[in-house]
Image: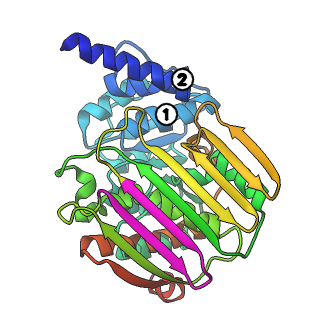
Protein backbone atom coordinates (compact mmCIF):
# COMPACT_ATOMS: atom_id res chain seq x y z
CA UNK A 1 0.00 0.00 0.00
CA UNK A 2 2.81 2.45 0.88
CA UNK A 3 4.64 1.62 -2.35
CA UNK A 4 1.42 2.12 -4.33
CA UNK A 5 0.83 5.56 -2.75
CA UNK A 6 4.41 6.60 -3.48
CA UNK A 7 4.09 5.39 -7.06
CA UNK A 8 0.88 7.38 -7.53
CA UNK A 9 2.54 10.46 -6.02
CA UNK A 10 5.48 10.12 -8.41
CA UNK A 11 3.12 9.64 -11.37
CA UNK A 12 1.21 12.74 -10.36
CA UNK A 13 4.39 14.78 -9.94
CA UNK A 14 5.62 13.70 -13.38
CA UNK A 15 2.23 14.50 -14.93
CA UNK A 16 2.44 17.96 -13.37
CA UNK A 17 5.91 18.47 -14.85
CA UNK A 18 4.52 17.63 -18.29
CA UNK A 19 1.62 20.06 -17.83
CA UNK A 20 3.06 22.91 -15.74
CA UNK A 21 6.82 22.61 -16.13
CA UNK A 22 9.46 21.71 -13.55
CA UNK A 23 9.53 25.01 -11.66
CA UNK A 24 5.85 25.24 -10.78
CA UNK A 25 5.70 21.51 -10.02
CA UNK A 26 8.57 21.90 -7.58
CA UNK A 27 6.73 24.68 -5.77
CA UNK A 28 3.55 22.58 -5.71
CA UNK A 29 5.48 19.68 -4.15
CA UNK A 30 7.16 21.96 -1.62
CA UNK A 31 3.74 23.40 -0.77
CA UNK A 32 2.58 19.90 0.15
CA UNK A 33 5.60 18.68 2.08
CA UNK A 34 6.66 22.07 3.56
CA UNK A 35 10.41 21.25 3.70
CA UNK A 36 12.57 22.47 6.56
CA UNK A 37 15.78 21.89 4.62
CA UNK A 38 15.32 24.30 1.72
CA UNK A 39 14.81 28.05 1.30
CA UNK A 40 13.82 30.07 -1.75
CA UNK A 41 16.49 32.70 -0.98
CA UNK A 42 15.95 36.46 -0.82
CA UNK A 43 15.80 39.14 -3.50
CA UNK A 44 17.16 42.66 -3.23
CA UNK A 45 13.72 44.11 -2.46
CA UNK A 46 11.38 42.74 0.21
CA UNK A 47 8.10 44.66 0.14
CA UNK A 48 5.24 42.12 0.00
CA UNK A 49 3.15 41.12 2.98
CA UNK A 50 1.04 37.96 2.79
CA UNK A 51 -2.07 37.10 4.81
CA UNK A 52 -2.95 33.42 4.47
CA UNK A 53 -0.14 30.90 3.99
CA UNK A 54 -2.00 27.88 2.62
CA UNK A 55 -1.16 25.78 -0.44
CA UNK A 56 -2.27 28.41 -2.95
CA UNK A 57 -0.16 31.13 -1.36
CA UNK A 58 2.88 28.90 -0.88
CA UNK A 59 2.93 27.27 -4.32
CA UNK A 60 1.05 29.56 -6.73
CA UNK A 61 1.42 33.12 -5.44
CA UNK A 62 4.94 32.34 -4.30
CA UNK A 63 5.99 30.81 -7.60
CA UNK A 64 4.42 33.46 -9.85
CA UNK A 65 6.19 36.26 -7.98
CA UNK A 66 9.46 34.35 -7.54
CA UNK A 67 9.79 33.47 -11.26
CA UNK A 68 9.52 37.16 -12.23
CA UNK A 69 10.90 39.14 -9.31
CA UNK A 70 12.50 36.71 -6.89
CA UNK A 71 11.44 36.35 -3.27
CA UNK A 72 10.02 39.77 -2.38
CA UNK A 73 8.13 38.67 0.74
CA UNK A 74 8.76 40.78 3.83
CA UNK A 75 6.16 39.41 6.26
CA UNK A 76 3.44 36.78 6.53
CA UNK A 77 0.63 35.65 8.80
CA UNK A 78 -1.78 32.72 9.02
CA UNK A 79 -4.14 31.66 11.80
CA UNK A 80 -2.78 28.14 11.21
CA UNK A 81 0.56 28.47 12.95
CA UNK A 82 2.01 25.43 11.16
CA UNK A 83 1.31 26.98 7.76
CA UNK A 84 2.58 30.31 9.05
CA UNK A 85 5.86 28.88 10.33
CA UNK A 86 6.56 26.71 7.28
CA UNK A 87 5.90 29.59 4.85
CA UNK A 88 8.13 31.89 6.89
CA UNK A 89 10.90 29.29 6.92
CA UNK A 90 10.79 28.62 3.17
CA UNK A 91 10.66 32.31 2.25
CA UNK A 92 13.19 33.41 4.89
CA UNK A 93 10.85 35.52 7.02
CA UNK A 94 10.48 36.16 10.72
CA UNK A 95 7.69 33.95 12.10
CA UNK A 96 6.88 36.48 14.84
CA UNK A 97 3.81 38.17 13.30
CA UNK A 98 0.93 37.45 15.66
CA UNK A 99 -1.89 38.96 13.57
CA UNK A 100 -2.77 40.24 10.13
CA UNK A 101 -2.39 43.74 11.55
CA UNK A 102 1.31 43.07 12.11
CA UNK A 103 1.67 42.41 8.37
CA UNK A 104 -0.42 45.40 7.30
CA UNK A 105 1.38 47.86 9.59
CA UNK A 106 4.87 46.55 8.77
CA UNK A 107 6.81 49.56 7.42
CA UNK A 108 8.59 47.45 4.81
CA UNK A 109 5.33 46.17 3.36
CA UNK A 110 3.99 48.15 0.41
CA UNK A 111 1.91 45.40 -1.18
CA UNK A 112 -0.52 43.23 0.78
CA UNK A 113 -1.59 39.90 -0.75
CA UNK A 114 -4.69 38.35 0.82
CA UNK A 115 -5.15 34.58 0.42
CA UNK A 116 -6.96 33.69 3.65
CA UNK A 117 -10.44 32.12 4.04
CA UNK A 118 -13.04 33.78 1.83
CA UNK A 119 -15.09 35.54 4.51
CA UNK A 120 -11.95 37.34 5.74
CA UNK A 121 -10.90 38.77 2.35
CA UNK A 122 -12.98 41.94 2.56
CA UNK A 123 -12.09 42.96 6.14
CA UNK A 124 -8.37 42.45 5.54
CA UNK A 125 -8.52 44.35 2.24
CA UNK A 126 -10.30 47.30 3.86
CA UNK A 127 -7.71 47.47 6.66
CA UNK A 128 -4.86 47.34 4.13
CA UNK A 129 -6.40 50.02 1.91
CA UNK A 130 -6.92 52.30 4.92
CA UNK A 131 -3.23 51.80 5.74
CA UNK A 132 -2.32 53.05 2.26
CA UNK A 133 -1.13 49.69 0.95
CA UNK A 134 -1.58 48.37 -2.58
CA UNK A 135 -3.84 45.32 -2.25
CA UNK A 136 -4.10 42.06 -4.14
CA UNK A 137 -7.19 40.20 -2.95
CA UNK A 138 -7.75 36.60 -3.93
CA UNK A 139 -11.19 35.60 -5.19
CA UNK A 140 -13.87 36.11 -4.05
CA UNK A 141 -13.45 39.75 -3.12
CA UNK A 142 -16.58 39.55 -0.93
CA UNK A 143 -19.05 36.90 0.21
CA UNK A 144 -22.03 39.14 0.98
CA UNK A 145 -23.64 42.31 -0.30
CA UNK A 146 -22.81 44.08 2.96
CA UNK A 147 -19.14 43.16 2.55
CA UNK A 148 -19.12 44.32 -1.06
CA UNK A 149 -20.73 47.63 -0.06
CA UNK A 150 -18.04 48.25 2.57
CA UNK A 151 -15.24 47.24 0.20
CA UNK A 152 -16.58 49.46 -2.60
CA UNK A 153 -16.57 52.43 -0.24
CA UNK A 154 -13.01 51.70 0.90
CA UNK A 155 -11.78 51.29 -2.70
CA UNK A 156 -13.25 54.63 -3.74
CA UNK A 157 -11.62 56.37 -0.77
CA UNK A 158 -8.23 54.67 -1.04
CA UNK A 159 -5.02 56.30 -2.21
CA UNK A 160 -3.57 53.01 -3.49
CA UNK A 161 -4.98 50.54 -6.07
CA UNK A 162 -6.57 47.13 -5.54
CA UNK A 163 -6.40 44.03 -7.76
CA UNK A 164 -8.35 40.77 -7.80
CA UNK A 165 -7.27 37.16 -8.20
CA UNK A 166 -9.63 36.12 -11.01
CA UNK A 167 -7.00 34.70 -13.32
CA UNK A 168 -8.80 33.25 -16.38
CA UNK A 169 -9.00 36.61 -18.19
CA UNK A 170 -5.19 36.73 -18.04
CA UNK A 171 -4.71 33.35 -19.72
CA UNK A 172 -3.07 33.18 -23.12
CA UNK A 173 -6.18 31.59 -24.64
CA UNK A 174 -8.58 34.32 -23.53
CA UNK A 175 -6.15 37.07 -24.53
CA UNK A 176 -5.69 35.48 -27.98
CA UNK A 177 -9.45 35.02 -28.36
CA UNK A 178 -10.08 38.68 -27.61
CA UNK A 179 -7.67 39.63 -30.39
CA UNK A 180 -9.69 37.48 -32.81
CA UNK A 181 -13.14 38.76 -31.78
CA UNK A 182 -12.49 42.43 -31.08
CA UNK A 183 -15.41 44.32 -29.52
CA UNK A 184 -18.56 42.79 -30.98
CA UNK A 185 -21.94 43.86 -29.63
CA UNK A 186 -23.51 40.61 -30.78
CA UNK A 187 -25.04 37.75 -28.79
CA UNK A 188 -22.44 35.43 -27.29
CA UNK A 189 -22.68 31.75 -26.45
CA UNK A 190 -20.25 30.56 -23.78
CA UNK A 191 -20.23 27.05 -22.34
CA UNK A 192 -17.87 26.13 -19.48
CA UNK A 193 -17.69 22.46 -18.44
CA UNK A 194 -15.64 22.13 -15.28
CA UNK A 195 -14.49 18.92 -13.60
CA UNK A 196 -13.70 20.13 -10.10
CA UNK A 197 -12.11 18.72 -6.97
CA UNK A 198 -14.09 16.41 -4.70
CA UNK A 199 -14.57 18.08 -1.33
CA UNK A 200 -16.21 16.60 1.74
CA UNK A 201 -19.52 17.73 3.22
CA UNK A 202 -17.70 19.51 6.05
CA UNK A 203 -15.23 21.37 3.84
CA UNK A 204 -15.13 25.07 4.70
CA UNK A 205 -16.02 26.04 1.09
CA UNK A 206 -19.54 24.75 1.77
CA UNK A 207 -20.23 27.03 4.72
CA UNK A 208 -22.88 29.65 3.89
CA UNK A 209 -20.77 32.33 5.59
CA UNK A 210 -17.93 31.50 3.15
CA UNK A 211 -20.22 31.74 0.11
CA UNK A 212 -20.34 27.99 -0.69
CA UNK A 213 -18.64 26.62 -3.82
CA UNK A 214 -20.36 29.33 -5.84
CA UNK A 215 -17.98 31.90 -4.36
CA UNK A 216 -15.18 29.37 -4.00
CA UNK A 217 -15.28 27.93 -7.52
CA UNK A 218 -18.12 29.02 -9.83
CA UNK A 219 -17.24 32.68 -9.37
CA UNK A 220 -14.25 32.07 -11.67
CA UNK A 221 -16.42 31.31 -14.70
CA UNK A 222 -19.06 33.92 -13.91
CA UNK A 223 -16.24 36.47 -13.78
CA UNK A 224 -14.83 35.13 -17.06
CA UNK A 225 -18.27 35.51 -18.67
CA UNK A 226 -18.63 39.11 -17.44
CA UNK A 227 -15.11 39.89 -18.67
CA UNK A 228 -15.79 38.48 -22.15
CA UNK A 229 -19.21 40.14 -22.39
CA UNK A 230 -17.52 43.43 -21.46
CA UNK A 231 -15.42 43.27 -24.64
CA UNK A 232 -18.54 44.82 -26.12
CA UNK A 233 -21.45 46.14 -24.05
CA UNK A 234 -22.44 44.17 -20.96
CA UNK A 235 -26.19 43.36 -21.18
CA UNK A 236 -28.25 44.56 -18.23
CA UNK A 237 -31.12 42.07 -17.86
CA UNK A 238 -30.54 38.33 -17.25
CA UNK A 239 -32.73 35.32 -16.59
CA UNK A 240 -31.04 32.61 -14.51
CA UNK A 241 -31.89 28.90 -14.34
CA UNK A 242 -30.15 26.45 -12.00
CA UNK A 243 -30.52 22.67 -12.12
CA UNK A 244 -29.25 20.73 -9.08
CA UNK A 245 -28.43 17.04 -9.40
CA UNK A 246 -28.43 16.55 -5.62
CA UNK A 247 -30.51 18.78 -3.40
CA UNK A 248 -28.53 17.80 -0.29
CA UNK A 249 -25.30 19.26 -1.73
CA UNK A 250 -26.55 21.87 -4.14
CA UNK A 251 -23.18 23.43 -4.91
CA UNK A 252 -21.88 20.17 -6.43
CA UNK A 253 -22.90 18.82 -9.83
CA UNK A 254 -25.07 21.68 -10.97
CA UNK A 255 -25.79 23.61 -14.16
CA UNK A 256 -26.24 27.38 -14.23
CA UNK A 257 -27.76 28.84 -17.40
CA UNK A 258 -27.98 32.58 -17.96
CA UNK A 259 -29.77 34.24 -20.87
CA UNK A 260 -29.70 37.98 -21.56
CA UNK A 261 -32.21 40.34 -23.12
CA UNK A 262 -29.85 40.53 -26.13
CA UNK A 263 -29.83 36.77 -26.66
CA UNK A 264 -26.55 35.84 -24.95
CA UNK A 265 -26.38 32.31 -23.56
CA UNK A 266 -23.96 31.46 -20.74
CA UNK A 267 -23.88 27.90 -19.42
CA UNK A 268 -21.68 26.72 -16.56
CA UNK A 269 -21.52 23.08 -15.49
CA UNK A 270 -19.58 22.25 -12.31
CA UNK A 271 -19.23 18.55 -11.63
CA UNK A 272 -17.22 16.79 -8.93
CA UNK A 273 -18.14 13.11 -9.10
CA UNK A 274 -14.52 11.98 -8.84
CA UNK A 275 -11.17 13.61 -8.18
CA UNK A 276 -9.42 14.67 -11.41
CA UNK A 277 -5.89 13.24 -11.28
CA UNK A 278 -4.37 16.31 -12.95
CA UNK A 279 -6.42 18.88 -11.03
CA UNK A 280 -9.36 20.96 -12.24
CA UNK A 281 -10.11 20.34 -15.92
CA UNK A 282 -12.00 22.85 -18.07
CA UNK A 283 -13.49 22.71 -21.54
CA UNK A 284 -14.75 26.03 -22.86
CA UNK A 285 -16.75 26.52 -26.05
CA UNK A 286 -17.47 29.96 -27.48
CA UNK A 287 -19.39 31.42 -30.40
CA UNK A 288 -19.98 35.04 -31.37
CA UNK A 289 -20.48 36.48 -34.81
CA UNK A 290 -18.33 34.52 -37.25
CA UNK A 291 -15.95 33.29 -34.52
CA UNK A 292 -16.13 29.81 -32.99
CA UNK A 293 -13.56 28.71 -30.42
CA UNK A 294 -12.80 25.69 -28.26
CA UNK A 295 -10.40 25.87 -25.31
CA UNK A 296 -9.15 22.53 -24.01
CA UNK A 297 -8.08 22.94 -20.37
CA UNK A 298 -6.13 26.10 -21.21
CA UNK A 299 -3.52 23.91 -22.90
CA UNK A 300 -4.86 24.13 -26.44
CA UNK A 301 -7.26 26.34 -28.33
CA UNK A 302 -8.76 26.14 -31.82
CA UNK A 303 -10.41 29.19 -33.39
CA UNK A 304 -12.55 29.04 -36.52
CA UNK A 305 -13.15 32.47 -38.08
CA UNK A 306 -15.14 32.13 -41.25
CA UNK A 307 -13.04 29.92 -43.56
CA UNK A 308 -9.89 30.37 -41.45
CA UNK A 309 -8.67 28.15 -38.64
CA UNK A 310 -6.03 28.98 -36.03
CA UNK A 311 -4.59 26.54 -33.51
CA UNK A 312 -2.75 27.48 -30.34
CA UNK A 313 -0.84 25.42 -27.80
CA UNK A 314 0.03 26.68 -24.34
CA UNK A 315 2.92 25.12 -22.47
CA UNK A 316 3.21 25.28 -19.58
CA UNK A 317 -0.57 25.21 -19.07
CA UNK A 318 -1.66 28.84 -18.85
CA UNK A 319 -4.69 29.49 -16.65
CA UNK A 320 -3.53 33.09 -16.24
CA UNK A 321 -2.01 32.93 -12.76
CA UNK A 322 1.39 34.33 -13.72
CA UNK A 323 0.07 37.57 -15.25
CA UNK A 324 -2.80 37.92 -12.78
CA UNK A 325 -0.65 37.63 -9.67
CA UNK A 326 1.85 40.29 -10.72
CA UNK A 327 -0.78 42.94 -11.51
CA UNK A 328 0.53 45.26 -8.77
CA UNK A 329 3.86 45.45 -10.63
CA UNK A 330 2.56 45.33 -14.21
CA UNK A 331 0.70 47.42 -16.79
CA UNK A 332 -1.48 44.40 -17.67
CA UNK A 333 -4.43 44.75 -15.27
CA UNK A 334 -8.21 44.28 -15.07
CA UNK A 335 -10.89 46.93 -14.98
CA UNK A 336 -11.93 46.78 -11.32
CA UNK A 337 -15.54 47.57 -12.24
CA UNK A 338 -15.73 44.25 -14.13
CA UNK A 339 -14.80 42.44 -10.93
CA UNK A 340 -17.44 44.34 -8.95
CA UNK A 341 -20.09 43.50 -11.54
CA UNK A 342 -19.19 39.81 -11.65
CA UNK A 343 -19.24 39.74 -7.83
CA UNK A 344 -22.76 41.17 -7.80
CA UNK A 345 -23.88 38.41 -10.15
CA UNK A 346 -22.01 35.73 -8.20
CA UNK A 347 -23.55 36.77 -4.89
CA UNK A 348 -27.02 36.69 -6.42
CA UNK A 349 -26.44 33.14 -7.66
CA UNK A 350 -24.88 32.07 -4.34
CA UNK A 351 -28.05 33.25 -2.60
CA UNK A 352 -30.12 31.21 -5.06
CA UNK A 353 -28.10 28.09 -4.23
CA UNK A 354 -28.24 28.63 -0.48
CA UNK A 355 -32.02 29.05 -0.68
CA UNK A 356 -32.55 26.22 -3.22
CA UNK A 357 -34.01 28.53 -5.87
CA UNK A 358 -34.16 27.34 -9.48
CA UNK A 359 -35.07 30.52 -11.33
CA UNK A 360 -34.46 34.22 -10.91
CA UNK A 361 -34.14 37.47 -12.82
CA UNK A 362 -31.16 39.76 -12.36
CA UNK A 363 -30.58 43.33 -13.50
CA UNK A 364 -27.22 45.00 -13.07
CA UNK A 365 -28.95 48.41 -13.16
CA UNK A 366 -31.09 47.44 -10.16
CA UNK A 367 -28.38 45.73 -8.12
CA UNK A 368 -25.57 48.25 -8.68
CA UNK A 369 -27.18 51.16 -6.74
CA UNK A 370 -27.70 48.91 -3.70
CA UNK A 371 -23.94 48.63 -3.27
CA UNK A 372 -22.21 51.46 -5.12
CA UNK A 373 -23.63 54.68 -3.76
Residue that badge 2 annotates: 18
Q: Residue at x 56, y 51 (%)?
A: 168
Quick check: can you spot residue 271? yes
Q: Residue at x 48, y 74 (%)?
A: 258
Q: Nearer the viewer, residue 368 or 284?
A: 284
Q: Residue at x 60, y 67 (%)?
A: 189
Left or right: 162 as drawn, with respect to 292: left
Q: Position of residue 307 (x, y in %)?
A: 83, 55
Q: From mark 1 to mark 2, how far is it between C-alphas?
A: 20 Å
Would you say residue 262 sits in the magenta stretch?
yes
Is 237 rendered above or below residue 39? below
Numbered circles on residues, count: 2
Q: Nearer the viewer, residue 163 or 28?
A: 28
Left or right: 23 as drawn, with respect to 68: left
- Give yes or no for contact between labels 1 and 2 (Cβ–Cβ under 8 Å): no
Quick check: can you spot residue 147? no
Residue that badge 1 annotates: 62
Residue range (magenta): 252-270
Comparing marks 1 and 2, which lies closer to the viewer? 2
Left or right: 28 as drawn, with respect to 309: left
Q: Nearer the viewer, residue 167 or 298?
A: 298
Q: Residue at x 31, y 63 (%)?
A: 211
Would you say residue 334 sits in the magenta stretch?
no
Quarter of the figure with the N terminus: top left
What crowding class fits label 1: few (fewer than 14 Cα within 10 Å), some (14-19), or many (20 or more)? many
Is 54 rendered above or below residue 111? above
Left or right: 30 as drawn, with respect to 1: right
Q: Main secondary structure of the magenta part?
A: strand
Amino acid sequence: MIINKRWLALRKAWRYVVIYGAGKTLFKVFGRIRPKWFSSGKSRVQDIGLIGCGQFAYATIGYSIWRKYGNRFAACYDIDRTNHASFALFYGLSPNASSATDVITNERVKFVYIASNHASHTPYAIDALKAGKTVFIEKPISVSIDQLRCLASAVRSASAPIYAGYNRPFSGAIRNLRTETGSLNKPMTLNCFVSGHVIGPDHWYRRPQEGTRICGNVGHWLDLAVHMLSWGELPDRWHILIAYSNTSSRDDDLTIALTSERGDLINIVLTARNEPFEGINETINFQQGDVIAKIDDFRRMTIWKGPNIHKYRYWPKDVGHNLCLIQPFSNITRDWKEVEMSTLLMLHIADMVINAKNTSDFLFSSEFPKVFI
